[in-house]
Image (cartoon, rainbow, N blue to C red):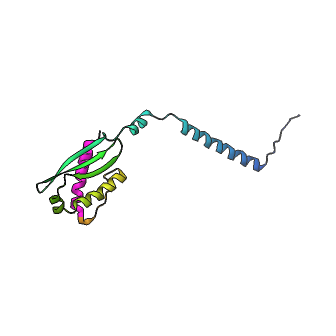
Amino acid sequence: MSSKTKIIIMKKRELIYTAIFAALAAVFLILLFLMFRPHSQDALSASAQPVYVPGVYTTPVTLNSNVMDLEVCVDADHINGIRLVNLSESAAAMFPLMQPALDNLAAQICETQSTKNVYYEASSQYTSQMLLDVIENTLRKARR
């Protein structure tokens, strides 16, 4: 009976290093797969679609027989400016909160590119709500 038994002696440190390198290799392969996998064309084309038709859009606003226009300038992806056009001096005197409320709303909307979560002062609450509705209607015209 002659059996040739082989005994392999490995140090614990070598086993730990081998396990760590195997785990790092697995993580590396997973990252390579995630980075270089083909992306779906639907996700890319949806993000590439422009949000607005570029141009200047107006909506008339009537307050006590005073007619003024709210003008929104947009490009393909951004709201560039919001202003009141044809605001007469008498309308500005009758509605003194109109221009400051619009300036506040326009600054927030142009910064965030959204009419959601817009804040306004309690003193101009109703004016701001009316202007925000008109701005949303005007932006609806500009959307594709």
Image quadrant where one finds the C terminus:
top left
Which quarter of the figure has residue 90? bottom left
At 27% from the left and 46% from the top, the residue drawn is 139
Give the image location of residue 82, x and y in percent: 28, 51
Which quarter of the figure has residue 99? bottom left
Give the image location of residue 6, x and y in percent: 83, 39
At 21% from the left and 60% from the top, the residue drawn is 126
Give 66 or 114, whichever is nearer the viewer: 66
**Can you say whether 37 is above or below 117 in the image?**
above
Q: Residue furthest bottom?
A: 123
Q: How many marks?
A: 0
Q: Residue furthest left?
A: 65
Give 113 or 45, whichever is nearer the viewer: 113
At 28% from the left and 64% from the top, the residue drawn is 121
Instruction: Judge left or right: residue 28 versus residue 114.
Output: right
Give the image location of residue 115, x and y in percent: 30, 52
**Can you say whether 104 is above or below 5 in the image?**
below
**Which residues lie in the magenta part?**
124-144
Which quarter of the figure has residue 21? top right
Q: Main secondary structure of the magenta part?
A: helix
The answer to if 40 sits in the magenta stretch is no
